[in-house]
Image: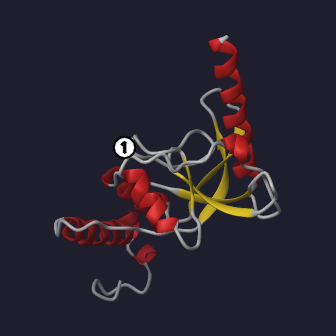
């Protein structure tokens, strides 16, 4: 804003201020990607109400960054992960990295890695690296329980995964 002599992006008419910010943001990120380095973005998450193409409303987890910024970043990245709190069957707290998205959670990966990777305090990074190396370090949705810190959508995700697992078992019979 200062560079363009604006006190706020809305000072310019017809969205010109916001267009200037977007252009600056995209230019800066393109320069960053051109360095060839691995780049990691971190964002908090929020639950938002979304309407399906049929008009049905549901809750979805997505990053808190602005829609335009996230749209640009997601299109340029290979992976988008989401971390959620669960419990193991014994009731111990677990932090799980969700690597594949659906209508409940906004995530994506190029495939070949487990959908749920534990983020152990001592071995979290090693487990993620091992997953990329092809090791089966993932946990099953059947081994995850919701807890006080689990978001509503996180609970729905596990419930949906369990139902899909049951359907697959029935179909195999």
Residue at horizontal 73 percent and vertical 43 percent from the top = 156
Residue 141: percent from left, percent from top:
67, 42
Residue 27: percent from left, percent from top:
23, 68
Observer able to see residue 68: no
Residue at horizontal 72 percent and vertical 30 percent from the top = 163
Q: Decide if residue 163 is on the left or right side of residue 122.
A: right
| Number of marks | 1
39 or 27: nearer the viewer:
39
Quadrant in which the C terminus appears = top right
34 or 94: nearer the viewer:
94
How was the colour assigned to the protein in this rendering?
secondary structure
Residue 158: percent from left, percent from top:
70, 43
Residue 52 higher or lower than 9, as above or below: above
Residue at horizontal 67 percent and vertical 56 percent from the top = 47
Q: Decide if residue 32 is on the left or right side of residue 106.
A: left
Residue 4 higher or lower than 40, as above or below: below
Quadrant in which the N terminus appears = bottom left
- Local packing at callout 1 (Cα closer than 10 Å; few below 14, some 14-19, many 20+) is few
48 or 163: nearer the viewer:
163
Q: Which picture quadrant has residue 40?
A: bottom left
Residue highlighted by disc 1: 110
Observer able to see residue 7: yes
Residue 41: percent from left, percent from top:
41, 68
- For the residue labelled by badge 1, is the local secondary structure a helix, a strand or a loop? loop
């Amino acid at each position: 804003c200062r560079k363009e002599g604006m006190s706020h992006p809305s000072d310019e008419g017809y969205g010109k201020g916001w267009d200037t910010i977007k252009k600056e943001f995209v230019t800066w990120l393109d320069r960053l990607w051109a360095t060839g380095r691995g780049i990691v973005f971190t964002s908090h998450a929020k639950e938002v109400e979304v309407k399906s193409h049929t008009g049905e409303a549901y809750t979805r987890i997505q990053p808190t960054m602005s829609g335009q910024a996230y749209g640009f970043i997601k299109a340029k990245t290979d992976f988008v992960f989401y971390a959620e709190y669960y419990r193991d069957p014994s009731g111990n707290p677990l932090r799980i990295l969700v690597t594949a998205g659906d209508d409940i959670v906004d995530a994506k990966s190029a495939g070949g890695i487990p959908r749920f990777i534990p983020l152990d305090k001592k071995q979290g990074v090693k487990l993620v690296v091992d997953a990329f190396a092809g090791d089966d370090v993932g946990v099953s949705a059947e081994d995850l329980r919701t807890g006080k810190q689990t978001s509503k959508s996180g609970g729905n995700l596990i419930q949906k995964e369990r139902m899909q697992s049951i359907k697959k078992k029935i179909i195999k019979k």
